[in-house]
Amino acid sequence: MATYGLKIFSGNSNLELAQKICDSLEIPLGRALVTTFSDGEIRVEVGENVRGADVFVVQSGAPPVNDHLMELLVMIDALKRASARRITAVIPYYSYSRQDRKNKPRVPITARLVADLITSVGTDRILTMDLHAGQIQGFFDIPVDNLYASPILLPYIREHFNHNLVVVSPDAGGVPRARAYAQRLPAGLALIDKRRVDVNQAEVMNIIGDVEGKTAIILDDMADTAGTLVEATRALLDRGASEVHACVTHPVLSGPAVERIEKSELKSLVVTDTLPLRPQAAHCDKIKVVSAARLFSQAIKSIHNEDSISSLFDIQH
């Protein structure tokens, strides 16, 4: 059992989630001024004593992504220089995660660059959710806890979609996640053979699996421009699915995403609050939000108390 104090601070990326986490833990959100100078430089002042404390900084990769990444780095530096005992970066959505490998000549591995930046300022531990690629954990030389959204999304699916289901992976990389959900529900399993024709543009080629007459649940870690969701919905309905829903952890929803969702035949899009919804998305009746606050609060409590958090990784929850 830890004997030193627990404190939680937040940048400006997702203050609502940070406050929900604190409410679940029944502790106040730490006082910190996080703003900018007139020229746009990040300004941080920690407003309370953190000497010897176990500090968690909640900051997601919400737009403007670069500003919020810089806020995180400056906050960690400020806390380190204020003699915090341990600093854990709580990053519900890890930005730049899609740039995790060299898939063509002369391109960066930006997910590794961001990992180096976060580590170099003195971060002791990372807590995140549904990394786009699991191998990103290996980019860090510090412990990384990558939570699953299954304890949040599975109960919602069971409550709202409980008859003749098929879980659909939008690409080959998502098959293990979709299979695990399908086994727990139980439900059928299908795969979309998707070929990406350009950045943020995907073309659905074929559907592998039986979707005839079934309620299809597309499962993915993020929705950005929603092109994949719309194309997948159309393909599933053409193959005989009775209706199509989607469950996505991170609602990036950039550019034309919300307009595409509203005009599509997708019945609903269930997301978590790892990212705050933009105003247009918040007013879209098809988009439903379930909170990740309780799961993050349980993980933070276990890390602080030096307890195992293995149960939080169990997709059976």
Image (tube, grey):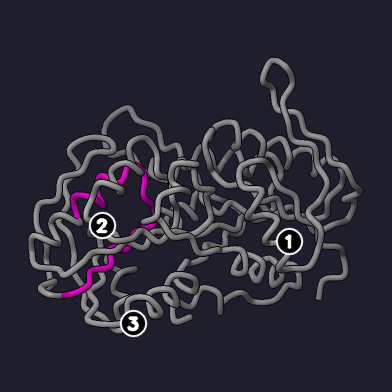
Q: Secondary structure at mark 3?
A: loop
Which range of residues does the magenta coloring cover?
214-232
- Is 151 placed left or right of 33 in the picture? left
Residue 80 magenta-highlighted: no
Residue 138 spot, x, y in % from top left: 49, 54
> Between 139 and 209, which is closer to the camera in this rendering?
209
Q: Earlier in the sequence, mark 1 or mark 2?
A: 1
Q: Earlier in the sequence, mark 3 or mark 1?
A: 1
Name the residue that disc number 3 marks: 185
Q: Is residue 37 above or below residue 219?
A: above
Residue 22, numbered circle: 1
Name the residue that disc number 2 marks: 266
- Residue at 69% x, 15% y is 39
Name the quadrant containing residue 206.
Answer: bottom left
* Gap in angstroms between the C-alphas marked 1 and 2: 34 Å
Residue 43 spot, x, y in % from top left: 76, 28
Q: Is residue 50 above or below residue 69?
A: below
Q: Amino acid at mark 3?
A: Leu
- Is 24 placed left or right of 252 in the picture? right
Q: Quadrant location of the N terminus? A: bottom right
- Residue at 74% x, 35% y is 34
Residue 222 spot, x, y in % from top left: 39, 52
Q: Secondary structure at mark 1?
A: helix
